[in-house]
Amino acid sequence: MTDGMFSEVLKTFLVKYGKEWDGREKHKIVGKTPLEEAAIIVEDYGLPCAKHEFVNEVYSMFSDHLCKVKALPGANRLIKHLSCHGVPMALASNSHRATIESKISYQHGWKESFSVIVGSDEVRTGKPSPDIFLEAAKRLNMEPSSSLVIEDSVIGVVAGKAAGMEVVAVPSLPKQTHRYIAADEVINSLLDLRPEKWGLPPFQDWIEGTLPSEPWYIGGPVVKGLGRGSKVLGIPTANLSTEGYSDVLSEHPSGVYFGWAGLSTRGVYKMVMSIGWNPYFDNAEKTIEPWLLHEFDEDFYDEELHLVIVGYIRPEANFPSLETLIAKIHEDRKVAERALDLPLYSKYRDDPYLKITSSKGQ
Ligand code: ADP
Ligand code: RBF
Ligand code: MG
C-alpha cells in the first residue's frame, strides 16, 4: 500500500478525528502489513480506536479507490515483456491477498501475468521475514537463488535477501537510496531495469539510446531557476514551474528526457531536459529544466514555452566532478539531436500544442 492513493484515504480518515496527515509517516509505513501500518498510525496520532477498527475502516474506504490506482511508470512495459518471454512471475506483498487481488483486477493483463500471488495473511510472518518470498518461489516451483525480487520498500529488500534472492530496489520515495544498501542494485524507476543483468531477456524497445514514450505535454511561462545553468555549467535551461503538473510528473519518473519545445514568439526547437532534484547539486525542490538546442541572442524569461516530450534517455545521476556532469549533458544533447531526426520522433515537431500561444492547457 505504498501509493499516493493510500495517503489520500488516510488524509480523509484522519480528518474525521480532527487530525491532519502530513505525509511524514510515509517512510515508516512503506512495505508494512496492514496491521503494522495501523499500529503506527493509531499510536503516532493518538487515535481513539483499536488497530483492527482502523484497518477495517481505512481498507473499506480504500477499496473504493483501488480502481483509480495507476500502475507505476514502466510497470506495464515490464510485465508485458516478461510474460511475453514466458518468465514465471509472482506477486508477493505484505498486503492481504484479497486487497492484492482487487487492486490488480483494475490493471489490464496483470491477473493473467502473475501465476502466483502471496499475501501476508497466507504465511506466518510478513516481510521483513523471508516467508512470503520463499512461499512464492515454492509455488512457482523455482529455486530462491535463481529468483529476482523487485521491491520498493526497505523491509521488502531485507526479506528478499533473507530468502537468498537477488533484489533490485525501486524506492517509492525520492532521495532514499542510502536506506537500500542491502539491495543488489537500486534503480530510480522501472524504466531503468536492465533484465539482462539478471539473466532475463533484454528489452528491445530502446532506439539509439532512447526509450520512446507516448508524447506528454507541459508548458507555461519560463521562470527564474537557481541561476546555475549558464553560470556554472555553460548550459542554460529555461525552467518551467512545477506547479499544476504534480499529476503529469508523478506519472513520469525524474530523469533526462527529450522532445520538442515551442516558444510562442520564436519557433519550434529540439530540446533535452532534466526533471528532478539534480543529485549533483542536491536541490530541495524538483525542477523542470529544458535546454533548447539552439543559440539565442537574448533571454526569454516569462515567455510562453510549450514542450512535447517524446522519450526518455536516462535517470538523473550524481557525478564526481562538474566536468563529468557537463560532459554527460552534452552527450545527452547529441543523443537527443540525433534521435529527434527519426520519423518516430520528428513527426511531433508539428504538434499543434507547440504553437498554442495562450497559457497552460493542452
Ligand atoms: P535560471 O537558473 O534562471 O534558469 P539559466 O542560467 O538556466 O538560469 O538560464 C536560463 C535562461 O537562459 C532561460 O530562462 C532563457 O531565458 C535563457 N536561454 C538562452 N538560451 C537558452 C537555451 N538555448 N535554452 C534554454 N534557455 C536559454
Ligand atoms: N543534474 C544532475 O545533478 N544530474 C544529472 O544527471 C543531470 N542531467 C542533466 C541533463 C540535462 C539534459 C540537463 C539540461 C541538465 C541536467 N542536470 C543534471 C541538471 C543541471 O544540474 C541543471 O541544469 C543545473 O543545476 C542548472 O539548474
Ligand atoms: Mg535554468
Image: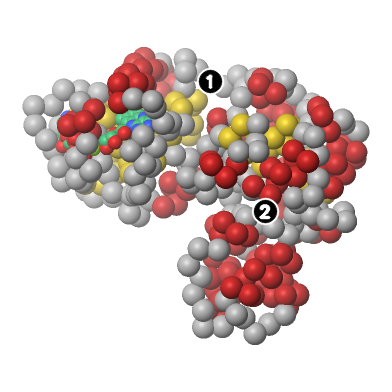
Q: Residues within 10 Å of mark 1 (few under 14, many from 20)?
A: few
Q: Nearer the viewer, residue 324 or 240?
A: 324
Mark toward the start of the polypeptide (2 vs 1): 2
| Amino acid of disc 2 | Gly
Q: Nearer the viewer, residue 344 or 76?
A: 76
Residue located 38% across and 25% down the image: 320
Q: Quadrant of residue 77?
A: top right
Residue located 20% across and 26% down the image: 234
Q: Position of residue 142 (x, y in %)?
A: 87, 31
Q: Is residue 349 visible?
A: no
Q: On the image, numbered disc 2 is attached to which residue?
A: 31
Q: Position of residue 65 (x, y in %)?
A: 62, 63
Could you tell me which secondary element the residue under label 2 belongs to?
A: loop
Residue located 23% across and 28% down the image: 233
> Quarter containing ligand 2?
top left
Q: On the image, numbered disc 1 is attached to which residue?
A: 206
Q: Position of residue 322 (x, y in %)?
A: 30, 26
